[in-house]
Amino acid sequence: MDWTPAPRRTSAMRREQNLALVGAVVSGAVIATGLLLVLMARVNPDGAARMRGVMLDIVTPVWSVVRAPFDGAGRVAGWSGDYLGAVSRNRDLETQLNAARAELQRAAADRQALVQLKRLVNVRDRARRVIGTARIVSATSGSVVRSAMIAAGRNDGVVPGLPVISAQGLIGRTIEAGAISARVLLLADPASRIPVMIVRTGQAALVVGTNSPALELRDLVGADVPLRAGDRLVTSGDGGVFPPGVPVGTVISAVEPPKVRPAANPVGAGFVTIEAAFMPLPVEAAIPNFGAPVPIEARRSGGGAPAPKPAAPLQ
Amino acid sequence: MARAAPLWRLMNAAERRRYWWGHWRLAVPAVTTALLALAMTAPLIVPVPAFPQLALLGVFVWTSFQPGLMPPWVAFLVGLVADLLFAQPLGVNATLFAATAAFVRFLETRYDHRAHGLDWGVAAGLIVIFELSTWLLMTLAGSPVPLAPLGWQVLTSIAAYPLVVAICARIQRRAFGPEGMR
């Protein structure tokens, strides 16, 4: 034999090589599945609503119990900030108070007049309805989605799409709900769009989150009055979710794009109220009609009779 | 050819129980990483996404500590949990965690053990790539986010790396170390 025999693969070697190959194939398949899930999320963003609700219900009780040290830390930070600027703020507040007292006198008279006028023209105000009051127990400070979790869920009547309001102003709206907990999309989230009105000028606009401390004001419509730093923004009631007149923030810089500081800080919010959607859009279920020649989309936009109950769970 | 009887056939009830319960160690890396993800939902509301990406660091560390117990598919499941916790579109973290585990596994087989400092450098690079890919995948999933604020998370994550290593090393010693084996 004057040739060297081919090196023999031992069975152990073969086994190892096969395992490595299988491992690589499985890894590739797993990553491909993940990308597929991302694409599915693009098509159907509310796909895993039930699973998200269950996860919320698992997480929220944990943080309801271990929340105390975080609350304490936040409160201490707030106190120290309060003490540092107390004197100058006190003077500022006194001057503001004097101005506000005078303003209040005029407002009381105006309110009387308004009541009389409303009675004259028969205006019906929709009353705001509080569904529940809950604590913010947790937040996703490490995620690109800015949300907080509250300890009230479907059992308390909280469903996705309700306004969440604190004593200082608007906090956000609910986007997911479990049985005993719900998730609130905060104003700072890039997906948050709040229809607002500028109090001084009456212009309508949208307040959009940017994942940074300041919010952005976009799509300003109405009379062409330039913005000023210090302009206050309240919800306009457009879109039917947020009741009108809830403080949203203050314009801190009027240069394009205008920056807004939110009125309510979710850190110190503690308790928040969840209100019923101010004027919810009616949910119409599509009625399938298989015998018709026109495409189903065309018919659906034509409008069918509204069904008594929505077929899909309320988003 | 005589085949050995299955292990549990040769045991009495107590031994069998101890044998099955002894498998809890298999879940240690996955559970630890899921708990790190849970820690990221602490009630600290800061206006920028500044909390360190502990879950990614957990996947990275466990893939090098216990490569057999943090394969890409386990990292994928942990990523799904993270997606549900963070209200992100399902699949963003899952894809990236699985890719991280696959990458570290490749790195370990190609160039074996590395010094701690180098590990830190590799982790820093991974975090930067992770944030960029998060931004890309969020756009792909139809909910785009601004890129710049993610820089905060890169900084805090790089700073938090030694902490995660310390936590995981302590757990590793307790669960898999010589005195923990018994």
Image (spheres, helix red, strand yellow):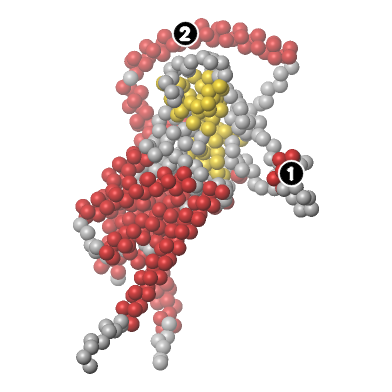
Q: Quadrant of residue A163?
A: top right
Q: Nearer the viewer, mark 1 or mark 2?
A: 1
Point out the image quarter for the N terminus of chain A: bottom left
Residue at left offset 62%, top offset 33%: A277
Residue at left offset 38%, top offset 70%: A21
Q: SS of the residue at dot 2?
A: helix
Q: Which residue position is annotated with label 1?
A: A299
Q: Which residue position is annotated with label 2?
A: A99
Image location (x, y in percent) of residue A287: 75, 47
Circle count: 2
Q: CA distance from mark 1 to mark 2?
A: 59 Å
Residue at left offset 45%, top offset 50%: B92
Image location (x, y in percent) of residue A198: 53, 19
Q: Residue B44: in sight, yes or no?
A: no
Image location (x, y in percent) of residue B4: 40, 86
The amino acid sitting under disc 2 is Ala
Q: Taking B49 as reference, is B12 above or below it? A: below
Q: Quadrant of residue A278?
A: top right
Residue at left offset 45%, top offset 11%: A97
Q: Nearer the viewer, residue B4 or A294?
A: A294
Q: Earlier in the sequence, mark 1 or mark 2?
A: 2
Of all chains, the one bearing label 2 is A
